[in-house]
Amino acid sequence: MELKLAAIAKPDDINFILGQSHFIKTVEDVYEAIVGTVPGAKFGLAFCESSGPALVRAAGTDDELVNLAKQNALALSAGHCFIVFLRNLYPVNVLNAIKMVPEVCRIFCASANPVQVILAETEQGRGILGVIDGMKTKGIEGEEDIAWRKGFLRKIGYKL
């Protein structure tokens, strides 16, 4: 077995969700989950098929994000993984809907941070072991940090 590290390539302002599922129907069902939850959502998704032709399958509402998803999925080439890139939308808006898709087994991360994916490769194929999401923690929040956090959540409309 060989361990590999793959960085998710994306613009800084784009959020994404990385997960694992178990069936080719994932592409259509995740698509439907997103548009059914946030009508007009701008996104692209790709899924790494793990048998048969073993292709990257893709869909979405934004061609740039669909291409970004295809490129990242191919770079990962890990069994049954999927990746969704979101524009002007936070993962929290669609995450529960995606988790409820019957084919979805797990979510590795939902982030806008720089992310590295830890892969294991054998003669059979590749699998995702985990992710490194963002940077190492620097300390514990103080009163000013708490005030900033609360203000930020209200500024972006997630708290009243």
Image (cartoon, helix red, strand yellow):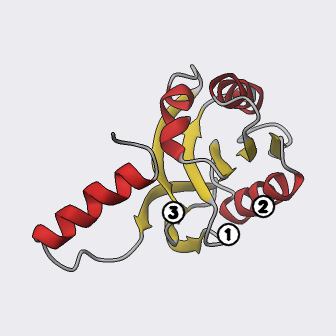
Q: Residue at image x 89%, y 52%?
A: 63
Q: How many marks?
A: 3
Question: Is the residue marked by circle 3 packed among few (<14), some (14-19), or many (20+) residues within 10 Å?
Answer: some
Residue 115, relative to residue 31: is it above or below?
Answer: below
Residue 152, relative to residue 139: is it above or below?
Answer: above
Distance between the Cα atoms at labels 2 and 3?
23 Å
Q: Amino acid at mark 2?
A: Leu
Q: Residue at image x 50%, y 29%?
A: 99
Using the image as rendered, state which of residue 151 and residue 15 is in the foreground.
151
Which element carries disc 3, helix, strand or loop?
strand
Foreground: disc 3 or disc 1: 1
Look at the image and tell me whether residue 141 can be seen. no
Distance between the Cα atoms at labels 3 and 1?
22 Å
Question: Which label is found at residue 68?
Answer: 2
Q: Decide which of tag 2 and tag 1 comes sooner along the chain.
A: 1
Foreground: disc 2 or disc 3: 2
Q: Amino acid at mark 3?
A: Ala
Question: Pointers 2 and 1 in contact (CB under 8 A)?
Answer: yes
Q: Residue at image x 46%, y 37%?
A: 106
Which element carries disc 2, helix, strand or loop?
helix
Residue of label 1: 10
Residue of label 3: 120
